[in-house]
Amino acid sequence: MFNSITKMTKKKSSLSTLANHKTISDARRMLPLAELKILMVEDDPFLRDLYQRIFDRASIKVELARDGEEGFDVVKAQKPDLMLLDVMLPGITGPELLSKMAKELEYVPMVIMLSDLDQIGVKDKCINLGAKAFISKNDVSGPELLRKVEEILKA
Amino acid sequence: MQFIKNKISSYIRFLADNQQVFLSLLLILLVPGILVFNTVFVVKSMDDNMNYELRLKAEMAGSIVARYSSDLLGDPTQLQAKIKLTVDESLHSSTRKVTIMVPEGENFQVLASSDQSEISQIRPQLQYTVAWHQHATIAQLVQTVQNHQTERLWQVVTPIATPTGSKLGLVEILVSTADMDARTQTVLVNSVLVLVASIGLVLLLIANNARLFQYALLFHKLQEVDKMKDNFISIASHELKTPVTAAKGFLSLVEQEKQVLPAEIQSDINKANMSLERLSDLVNDLLNVSRIEQKRLAIDPVPTDIRTVVGEVFEDLSGSAQKKGLTIEYHPFTGELPPVLIDPAKFRQIMVNLLTNAIKYTISGKVEVNIIFEDLGKVAVSVKDTGIGMSAGDMEKLFTQFYRVRNRKARDIVGTGLGLWITKQLTEMMDGKILVESIEDVGSRFTVVFSVIPTKKK
Ligand SMILES: Nc1ncnc2c1ncn2[C@@H]1O[C@H](COP(=O)(O)OP(=O)(O)OP(=O)(O)O)[C@@H](O)[C@H]1O
Ligand SMILES: [Mg+2]
C-alpha cells in the first residue's frame, strides 16, 4: 500500500515538489536561528569562510559542505532544518541536488538558494524543484544575510 | 591510413558546417557536368539520325534498282550498262557499289556490277541467303579496310521479284558513311570547342567570385568569435563576482565591529568599500550586457506601484546628492495611480542609473524627480538636473555601449558608459520608452514612460 503511493508520487513528474516529503515543522520554523540545524553548501573557500564568520559572530552553528555530494550526505545523515544552497556547484549543481533529494530522501530540509545568477528559467526551475526562496549573493554579502534568512523562514 | 581517414572526415565535417561552400562546390561540378553531358548527347543523337537517314536512302535506291532489274535479268549486258549509268549519274557519290546477283546453288553469282571485275564471282554471304529466304530488305553496317583506311558502309540487300512475287535475284548496294562521319566530326569538334569555352567561362566566373566563399567563411568565423566573446564576458564576470562578494562581505564584517575604529582607518575602509562598490557595479553591468545580448536576462513583471520603487531609490541616493551640495526634490503624483506591469528590480535599476547620472553629472544646482500621470494610460517618471548637459551630437550616441561624453567637464567623472545602454534595453524589454532632452551647460531631463494596467471603471 505504502509502496504504491510512493511510486505514484514518483511518477507524477520530475517537478514533484517537496510537499510530499517530511520537512521542517511549522513549530521549529518559528524558533530562533541559533536553535536550528543549518547546512550551507558553497564551493568557494573564501565565501565559505565568510559565511562561517557571519554565523559565528551571531553565535549560530552552521554545518558547511563543499559540493553537492557532500551536501547530500549531510542532509541524509543529520537531517538539518534549513539548507542554504549555492546554484553553481562543481559536480552536481544546486538544482540537480534538489531533484536528487526529492527522489532519494524521505526527509528534505527547507532550501534557500544562494545565487548570483539572474538567468531565465533558473529561478523558476529551483522553485519548481522545491526551493523556498532565492537570495542574491551580491545584494546580501554581509551579516544582512542572517536577517534575510530569518525573514524567509518566518514568512 | 588513419591519418587520411581523419583528414577526410575533417573535410566532411567542414563541409557539413559550411553549407554555402558545399553548395558552391556542387555547382562547380554540376554545371560543367551538365554541359559535357549535353554535348555528348546532342552529337550522339545527331549521328544516329543521320545514319538512319542514310540507311533509308540506301534502301530506297535498292528497291528502285530491284524494280527495273527484274525486266533486264535476261539481258546482262544491258543490265550492266544501266547499272553503270545509275551509279555514275543518278546516285549520290557516296554510293560505293551496286551489284545484281542471281542464285547459284546454295550461293549467289554476280550478274552485273558497277565494279566490272566482279562479274561472275560466286558470293557465299549469309545476308544474301537471309534476304532471299525472308523475301525482305536487309540493311547492316559493315567495315572495310582499304589502304589502311577503315570505312563504314551501309550494306543493303533487296530481293528482285516479278510483279507476281516470284523471286529472281538480289540487289546489293553499298553506301559509305564517310561523308556523314566527316560532318559529324566537324560538329563534334565545334561542340567540344564550345564546351571547353563555356566550362572555362564558368570556372573563371567562379574564380572571380572566390571572394564570396571567403566572405562566407569569414562570416561564419565572426559569428563564432562573437559567441566566444559573449561567453568570455559571461564567464569572466561570473568568476569576478565571487571574490568581489567575499571582499564586500569581509569588509562589512569589519564595519560592524563593535569597537570604534580610528578615523583614518575608517576612512580607508570606506574608500576600499567604494572601490569595491565600483568594481561590483562594473562587473554587474558587464554581466547585464552579456545577458541582455544573449537574451538570457529574466524579467519578472508584477503589478507595481512605481512610486514605491522611485521613493526608495530617491531615499537611497538623496544622501549622496546632499553631500555634493545639491538640492534634490521628489514630486510624486499624489492622486490615484494605477499599477504598472514591470519587474520592480529591473525598474529599480533604471531609476538608480538615471538618478546616479543626474547627481554625477551635476556640479551645482538641483536634481528633481517627477512622476506625471495624466490619465492617458501612461505614466512618466522624469529625472531633471541642472548639470553639464550635452550637445545634440552626444545625445544621438548616448544609448550606445561604452559611449561617454568627452569634454573637460565630464573628464573627472568616473564611469564606463554602459549605464544608459542597459537602462534603455531594460526599459524596452518592459515595453517602456526612454526620452532625453538636454542643453549643454544648462541641464538634462531623462524620462521613462510606461503603460499603466487599465482600470475597469465606468
Ligand atoms: N544627466 C546627465 N547629464 C549630462 N550628461 C549625462 C547625463 N547622463 C548621462 N550623461 C552622459 O552620457 C554618458 C553615458 O552615460 P552612462 O550612464 O551610459 O555611462 P556612465 O555614467 O559614463 O557610466 P556607467 O556605466 O557607470 O553608468 C555619460 O558618460 C555622460 O557623458
Ligand atoms: Mg551612468
Image (cartoon, rainbow, N blue to C red):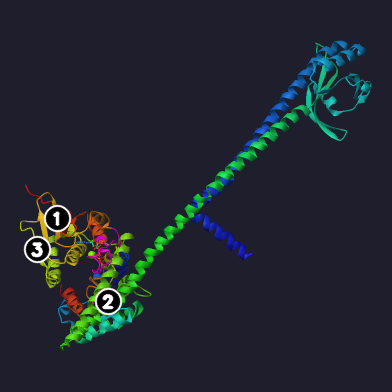
**Helix, strand or loop at mark 1:** strand
- State the residue position of label 1: B380
Cα separation between marks 3 and 1: 14 Å
Q: Is residue B192 visible?
A: yes
Residue at image coords 26%, 82%: A50
Residue hosting label 2? B245
For the C terminus of chain A, give its image quadrant. bottom left
Which corner quadrant of the figure contains ligand 1? bottom left
- On the image, the x and y values in percent for residue B283 come to 29, 70
Q: Is residue A22 visible?
A: no
Cβ–Cβ under 8 Å for marks 3 and 1: no
Query: Tag 3: residue type?
Result: Tyr
Instruction: Tell me where residue A23 sits by quadrant.
Output: bottom left
Chain letter behind tag 3: B
Local crowd size for mark 2, using a 10 Å CA cut-off: few (<14), some (14–19), many (≥20): many
In the image, which residues are magenta? Answer: B400-420
- Give the quadrant of the N terminus of chain A: bottom left
| Disc 3 from disc 2: Cα separation | 32 Å
Q: Earlier in the sequence, mark 2 or mark 1?
A: 2
